[in-house]
Amino acid sequence: MSSADLEREIDLALQRLPAPRAPRTLAPRVMQAVAARVYAVAAAPAGWRRWPPVWRALGLVVACSIVAAIVVGVPLLSSYVENMAGPRAVADLWEMFAAPLVAPALVVVTVMCTAAALLLAALKHIAWEPQWTSHS
Amino acid sequence: MTDVQRFEAFLLAHQDMVFATAVRLVGRSAEAEDIAQTTFLKAWERFDELQDNPAATGWLKTVATNLSLNHLSRYRSRWRFFSELTREPGAGDDSQPFEGRLAAEGRSDDAVMEAEELAELERALRALPPHQRVPIVLFHFDRKSYDEIASRLGVSVAKIKTDIHRGRLALRAVLEGTHVIR
Protein backbone atom coordinates (compact mmCIF):
# COMPACT_ATOMS: atom_id res chain seq x y z
CA MET A 1 0.00 0.00 0.00
CA SER A 2 1.37 3.41 -0.96
CA SER A 3 1.72 6.26 1.47
CA ALA A 4 -1.00 8.19 -0.36
CA ASP A 5 -3.42 5.25 -0.12
CA LEU A 6 -2.69 4.91 3.58
CA GLU A 7 -3.31 8.63 4.06
CA ARG A 8 -6.62 8.42 2.21
CA GLU A 9 -7.83 5.37 4.12
CA ILE A 10 -6.93 6.77 7.51
CA ASP A 11 -8.46 10.11 6.61
CA LEU A 12 -11.75 8.46 5.59
CA ALA A 13 -11.82 6.43 8.78
CA LEU A 14 -11.03 9.41 11.02
CA GLN A 15 -13.65 11.59 9.34
CA ARG A 16 -16.27 9.01 10.28
CA LEU A 17 -15.51 9.45 13.95
CA PRO A 18 -18.18 11.43 15.79
CA ALA A 19 -16.75 14.36 17.73
CA PRO A 20 -16.29 13.44 21.40
CA ARG A 21 -18.87 15.19 23.53
CA ALA A 22 -17.98 17.26 26.53
CA PRO A 23 -18.55 15.59 29.90
CA ARG A 24 -21.60 16.78 31.79
CA THR A 25 -19.36 18.16 34.51
CA LEU A 26 -17.70 20.72 32.22
CA ALA A 27 -20.45 23.34 31.99
CA PRO A 28 -21.15 23.43 35.76
CA ARG A 29 -17.41 23.70 36.46
CA VAL A 30 -16.98 26.60 34.08
CA MET A 31 -20.08 28.42 35.31
CA GLN A 32 -18.97 27.97 38.91
CA ALA A 33 -15.60 29.52 38.07
CA VAL A 34 -17.30 32.36 36.21
CA ALA A 35 -19.61 33.00 39.17
CA ALA A 36 -16.60 33.11 41.49
CA ARG A 37 -14.94 35.70 39.27
CA VAL A 38 -18.08 37.80 39.03
CA TYR A 39 -18.35 37.72 42.82
CA ALA A 40 -14.68 38.64 43.23
CA VAL A 41 -15.11 41.67 41.02
CA ALA A 42 -18.31 42.74 42.77
CA ALA A 43 -16.73 42.32 46.21
CA ALA A 44 -13.47 44.08 45.35
CA PRO A 45 -13.18 47.63 46.68
CA ALA A 46 -13.66 50.22 43.99
CA GLY A 47 -10.21 51.55 43.14
CA TRP A 48 -9.48 55.00 41.78
CA ARG A 49 -9.42 53.67 38.23
CA ARG A 50 -13.01 52.45 38.61
CA TRP A 51 -14.33 55.77 39.88
CA PRO A 52 -16.62 57.72 37.56
CA PRO A 53 -14.64 60.25 35.48
CA VAL A 54 -16.10 63.21 37.35
CA TRP A 55 -15.04 61.79 40.71
CA ARG A 56 -11.59 61.01 39.37
CA ALA A 57 -11.19 64.59 38.14
CA LEU A 58 -12.40 65.95 41.48
CA GLY A 59 -10.00 63.68 43.35
CA LEU A 60 -7.14 64.93 41.22
CA VAL A 61 -8.09 68.55 41.85
CA VAL A 62 -8.31 67.98 45.61
CA ALA A 63 -4.93 66.20 45.68
CA CYS A 64 -3.30 69.03 43.71
CA SER A 65 -4.90 71.58 46.00
CA ILE A 66 -3.46 69.90 49.08
CA VAL A 67 0.01 69.80 47.55
CA ALA A 68 -0.26 73.44 46.46
CA ALA A 69 -1.49 74.47 49.90
CA ILE A 70 1.51 72.83 51.53
CA VAL A 71 4.02 74.21 49.05
CA VAL A 72 2.63 77.73 49.17
CA GLY A 73 1.30 77.71 52.72
CA VAL A 74 4.43 76.72 54.61
CA PRO A 75 6.59 79.63 53.35
CA LEU A 76 3.68 81.98 53.98
CA LEU A 77 3.28 80.69 57.52
CA SER A 78 7.01 80.97 58.09
CA SER A 79 7.04 84.53 56.82
CA TYR A 80 4.01 85.39 58.94
CA VAL A 81 5.55 84.03 62.13
CA GLU A 82 8.83 85.86 61.56
CA ASN A 83 7.11 89.17 60.95
CA MET A 84 4.39 88.83 63.54
CA ALA A 85 4.16 91.49 66.15
CA GLY A 86 4.40 90.39 69.74
CA PRO A 87 6.79 88.37 71.83
CA ARG A 88 9.95 87.37 69.99
CA ALA A 89 9.95 83.96 71.68
CA VAL A 90 7.38 82.49 69.29
CA ALA A 91 9.42 83.50 66.25
CA ASP A 92 12.61 82.15 67.85
CA LEU A 93 10.94 78.81 68.64
CA TRP A 94 9.69 78.59 65.08
CA GLU A 95 13.12 79.31 63.61
CA MET A 96 14.94 76.95 65.98
CA PHE A 97 12.67 73.92 66.04
CA ALA A 98 9.78 73.99 63.58
CA ALA A 99 11.19 75.59 60.44
CA PRO A 100 14.13 73.15 59.99
CA LEU A 101 11.77 70.19 60.36
CA VAL A 102 9.06 71.26 57.96
CA ALA A 103 10.83 70.41 54.69
CA PRO A 104 12.18 66.98 55.82
CA ALA A 105 8.81 66.12 57.39
CA LEU A 106 7.03 66.92 54.14
CA VAL A 107 9.47 64.76 52.20
CA VAL A 108 9.06 61.86 54.65
CA VAL A 109 5.27 62.11 54.60
CA THR A 110 5.20 62.23 50.80
CA VAL A 111 7.54 59.25 50.46
CA MET A 112 5.61 57.23 53.04
CA CYS A 113 2.26 57.98 51.42
CA THR A 114 3.59 57.03 47.99
CA ALA A 115 5.10 53.81 49.34
CA ALA A 116 1.88 52.90 51.13
CA ALA A 117 -0.17 53.55 48.01
CA LEU A 118 2.17 51.43 45.88
CA LEU A 119 2.17 48.61 48.44
CA LEU A 120 -1.61 48.66 48.65
CA ALA A 121 -1.92 48.61 44.87
CA ALA A 122 0.52 45.68 44.65
CA LEU A 123 -1.33 43.75 47.35
CA LYS A 124 -4.66 44.34 45.63
CA HIS A 125 -3.21 43.22 42.32
CA ILE A 126 -1.75 40.03 43.77
CA ALA A 127 -4.26 38.99 46.37
CA TRP A 128 -7.54 40.58 45.60
CA GLU A 129 -8.20 41.57 42.03
CA PRO A 130 -8.41 38.79 39.43
CA GLN A 131 -5.91 38.96 36.60
CA TRP A 132 -8.43 39.98 34.00
CA THR A 133 -10.84 42.67 33.09
CA SER A 134 -14.31 41.51 33.75
CA HIS A 135 -17.96 41.96 33.10
CA SER A 136 -19.34 43.17 36.33
CA MET B 1 -30.72 38.22 29.74
CA THR B 2 -27.56 38.89 31.76
CA ASP B 3 -23.99 38.48 30.60
CA VAL B 4 -23.71 35.30 32.66
CA GLN B 5 -26.81 33.79 31.07
CA ARG B 6 -25.61 34.69 27.60
CA PHE B 7 -22.24 33.18 28.39
CA GLU B 8 -23.85 29.96 29.59
CA ALA B 9 -25.69 29.64 26.29
CA PHE B 10 -22.41 30.35 24.47
CA LEU B 11 -20.67 27.68 26.57
CA LEU B 12 -23.32 25.06 25.90
CA ALA B 13 -23.17 25.78 22.18
CA HIS B 14 -19.40 25.35 21.93
CA GLN B 15 -18.37 22.99 24.70
CA ASP B 16 -18.38 19.84 22.56
CA MET B 17 -16.14 21.39 19.91
CA VAL B 18 -13.68 22.75 22.48
CA PHE B 19 -13.56 19.50 24.41
CA ALA B 20 -13.15 17.44 21.23
CA THR B 21 -10.25 19.63 20.13
CA ALA B 22 -8.51 19.23 23.46
CA VAL B 23 -9.18 15.56 24.08
CA ARG B 24 -7.92 14.51 20.67
CA LEU B 25 -4.69 16.42 21.20
CA VAL B 26 -3.95 15.50 24.80
CA GLY B 27 -5.59 12.09 24.75
CA ARG B 28 -7.07 12.19 28.24
CA SER B 29 -10.53 13.34 29.26
CA ALA B 30 -9.56 14.80 32.63
CA GLU B 31 -6.80 16.94 31.18
CA ALA B 32 -8.97 17.93 28.23
CA GLU B 33 -11.70 19.06 30.61
CA ASP B 34 -9.21 21.28 32.44
CA ILE B 35 -8.06 22.74 29.14
CA ALA B 36 -11.65 23.30 28.01
CA GLN B 37 -12.39 25.09 31.28
CA THR B 38 -9.36 27.36 30.86
CA THR B 39 -10.41 28.06 27.28
CA PHE B 40 -13.87 29.14 28.36
CA LEU B 41 -12.54 31.29 31.18
CA LYS B 42 -10.39 33.09 28.63
CA ALA B 43 -13.51 33.44 26.49
CA TRP B 44 -15.34 34.96 29.47
CA GLU B 45 -12.61 37.58 29.78
CA ARG B 46 -13.27 38.61 26.17
CA PHE B 47 -16.93 37.82 26.01
CA ASP B 48 -17.83 41.37 24.98
CA GLU B 49 -15.89 40.81 21.76
CA LEU B 50 -16.81 37.16 21.25
CA GLN B 51 -20.54 37.12 21.73
CA ASP B 52 -22.34 37.43 18.40
CA ASN B 53 -18.98 37.26 16.66
CA PRO B 54 -18.90 34.70 13.81
CA ALA B 55 -15.17 34.21 14.43
CA ALA B 56 -15.78 33.01 17.99
CA THR B 57 -15.71 29.33 17.03
CA GLY B 58 -12.34 29.72 15.34
CA TRP B 59 -11.03 31.70 18.29
CA LEU B 60 -12.11 28.99 20.72
CA LYS B 61 -10.55 26.26 18.58
CA THR B 62 -7.28 28.16 18.31
CA VAL B 63 -7.11 28.80 22.04
CA ALA B 64 -7.98 25.18 22.87
CA THR B 65 -5.33 23.95 20.42
CA ASN B 66 -2.67 26.28 21.80
CA LEU B 67 -3.47 25.38 25.39
CA SER B 68 -3.36 21.68 24.54
CA LEU B 69 -0.01 21.99 22.79
CA ASN B 70 1.36 24.08 25.64
CA HIS B 71 0.13 21.47 28.08
CA LEU B 72 1.85 18.72 26.13
CA SER B 73 5.05 20.71 25.70
CA ARG B 74 5.43 20.86 29.46
CA TYR B 75 5.78 17.11 29.38
CA ARG B 76 7.90 16.96 26.27
CA SER B 77 10.80 15.24 27.99
CA ARG B 78 8.37 12.68 29.28
CA TRP B 79 6.99 12.20 25.75
CA ARG B 80 10.41 11.40 24.46
CA PHE B 81 10.96 8.86 27.16
CA PHE B 82 7.61 7.17 26.78
CA SER B 83 7.65 7.36 23.00
CA GLU B 84 10.44 4.81 23.11
CA LEU B 85 8.25 2.36 24.95
CA THR B 86 5.68 0.06 23.40
CA ARG B 87 2.22 1.05 24.44
CA GLU B 88 -0.54 -1.39 25.10
CA PRO B 89 -3.58 -0.83 22.90
CA GLY B 90 -5.90 1.45 24.83
CA ALA B 91 -3.28 2.24 27.46
CA GLY B 92 -3.67 5.67 28.96
CA ASP B 93 -6.99 6.11 27.29
CA ASP B 94 -10.06 7.11 29.19
CA SER B 95 -12.68 7.49 26.52
CA GLN B 96 -15.45 6.30 28.77
CA PRO B 97 -17.90 9.07 27.86
CA PHE B 98 -17.58 8.20 24.19
CA GLU B 99 -18.21 4.50 24.75
CA GLY B 100 -20.92 5.12 27.27
CA ARG B 101 -22.71 7.32 24.79
CA LEU B 102 -22.52 4.67 22.11
CA ALA B 103 -23.73 1.93 24.40
CA ALA B 104 -26.57 4.05 25.71
CA GLU B 105 -28.13 4.60 22.33
CA GLY B 106 -30.45 1.95 20.95
CA ARG B 107 -29.13 0.76 17.58
CA SER B 108 -29.36 -2.10 15.17
CA ASP B 109 -26.70 -4.83 15.24
CA ASP B 110 -24.84 -3.28 12.29
CA ALA B 111 -24.99 0.14 13.84
CA VAL B 112 -23.79 -1.21 17.17
CA MET B 113 -20.93 -3.01 15.44
CA GLU B 114 -19.94 0.13 13.58
CA ALA B 115 -20.20 2.15 16.76
CA GLU B 116 -17.91 -0.33 18.49
CA GLU B 117 -15.45 -0.12 15.63
CA LEU B 118 -15.46 3.66 15.75
CA ALA B 119 -15.04 3.56 19.50
CA GLU B 120 -12.04 1.29 18.98
CA LEU B 121 -10.60 3.74 16.46
CA GLU B 122 -11.13 6.69 18.81
CA ARG B 123 -9.47 4.70 21.58
CA ALA B 124 -6.57 3.81 19.32
CA LEU B 125 -6.14 7.43 18.29
CA ARG B 126 -6.01 8.60 21.89
CA ALA B 127 -3.64 5.78 22.76
CA LEU B 128 -1.07 6.85 20.19
CA PRO B 129 2.01 8.45 21.70
CA PRO B 130 1.71 12.25 21.66
CA HIS B 131 4.43 12.74 19.05
CA GLN B 132 2.28 10.72 16.62
CA ARG B 133 -1.19 11.65 17.81
CA VAL B 134 -0.71 15.43 17.78
CA PRO B 135 0.46 15.75 14.16
CA ILE B 136 -2.18 13.25 13.03
CA VAL B 137 -4.93 15.28 14.70
CA LEU B 138 -3.59 18.54 13.27
CA PHE B 139 -3.31 16.98 9.80
CA HIS B 140 -6.56 15.03 9.57
CA PHE B 141 -8.93 17.07 11.73
CA ASP B 142 -7.54 20.59 11.49
CA ARG B 143 -6.35 20.19 7.89
CA LYS B 144 -2.93 21.66 8.59
CA SER B 145 -0.13 21.04 6.13
CA TYR B 146 3.07 19.20 7.02
CA ASP B 147 4.93 22.51 6.95
CA GLU B 148 2.44 24.20 9.26
CA ILE B 149 2.55 21.32 11.71
CA ALA B 150 6.33 21.23 11.70
CA SER B 151 6.49 24.96 12.26
CA ARG B 152 3.90 24.85 15.04
CA LEU B 153 5.59 21.98 16.85
CA GLY B 154 9.12 23.20 16.22
CA VAL B 155 10.39 20.01 14.59
CA SER B 156 11.50 19.13 11.08
CA VAL B 157 9.04 18.32 8.32
CA ALA B 158 10.78 14.98 7.85
CA LYS B 159 10.11 14.03 11.47
CA ILE B 160 6.48 15.09 11.17
CA LYS B 161 6.04 12.94 8.06
CA THR B 162 7.68 9.99 9.77
CA ASP B 163 5.61 10.34 12.92
CA ILE B 164 2.37 10.72 10.98
CA HIS B 165 3.19 7.72 8.82
CA ARG B 166 3.95 5.56 11.84
CA GLY B 167 0.79 6.75 13.54
CA ARG B 168 -1.26 5.90 10.48
CA LEU B 169 0.26 2.44 10.36
CA ALA B 170 -0.64 1.91 14.01
CA LEU B 171 -4.20 3.08 13.37
CA ARG B 172 -4.46 0.91 10.30
CA ALA B 173 -3.42 -2.12 12.30
CA VAL B 174 -6.30 -1.39 14.67
CA LEU B 175 -8.70 -0.74 11.81
CA GLU B 176 -7.85 -4.01 10.10
CA GLY B 177 -8.74 -5.81 13.29
CA THR B 178 -12.06 -4.02 13.59
CA HIS B 179 -12.96 -3.82 9.88
CA VAL B 180 -13.47 -0.07 9.88
CA ILE B 181 -11.60 0.09 6.60
CA ARG B 182 -14.07 -1.09 3.99
Image (cartoon, coloured by chain):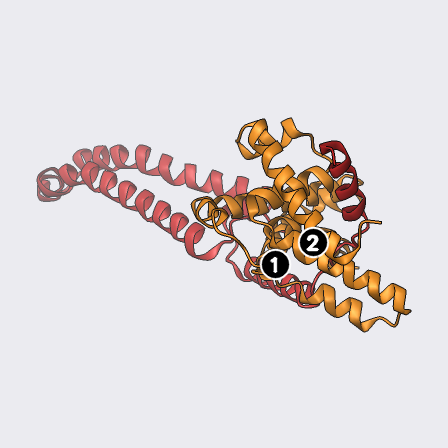
Chain colours: A red, B orange
Residue most extreme to the front:
A1
Q: Which residue is rendered at x = 56% and y = 59% of the image?
A: B88
Q: Which amino acid is tagged 1?
A: Pro
Q: Which residue is mark 1?
A: B89
Horizontal arrangement in the rendering, residue B24 relative to residue A107 (left or right):
right
Q: Position of residue A57 (x, y in %)?
A: 54, 39
Horizontal arrangement in the rendering, residue B6 relative to residue B166 (left or right):
right
Q: Position of residue B2 (x, y in %)?
A: 75, 59
**Vertical relation: B88 (above or below) A72:** below
Element type at marker 1? loop
Circle count = 2
Q: Which mark is residue B174?
A: 2
On the question of residue A83 being in view, the answer is yes
Q: Which mark is residue B51?
A: none
Choose between B40 and B21: the one closer to the eye. B21
**Vertical relation: A10 (above or below) A23:** above
Q: Which amino acid is tagged 2?
A: Val
Q: Position of residue B30 (x, y in %)?
A: 59, 62
Choose between B51 and B28: the one closer to the eye. B28
Say if labels 1 and 2 share a chain.
yes
Q: Position of residue B32 (x, y in %)?
A: 61, 56
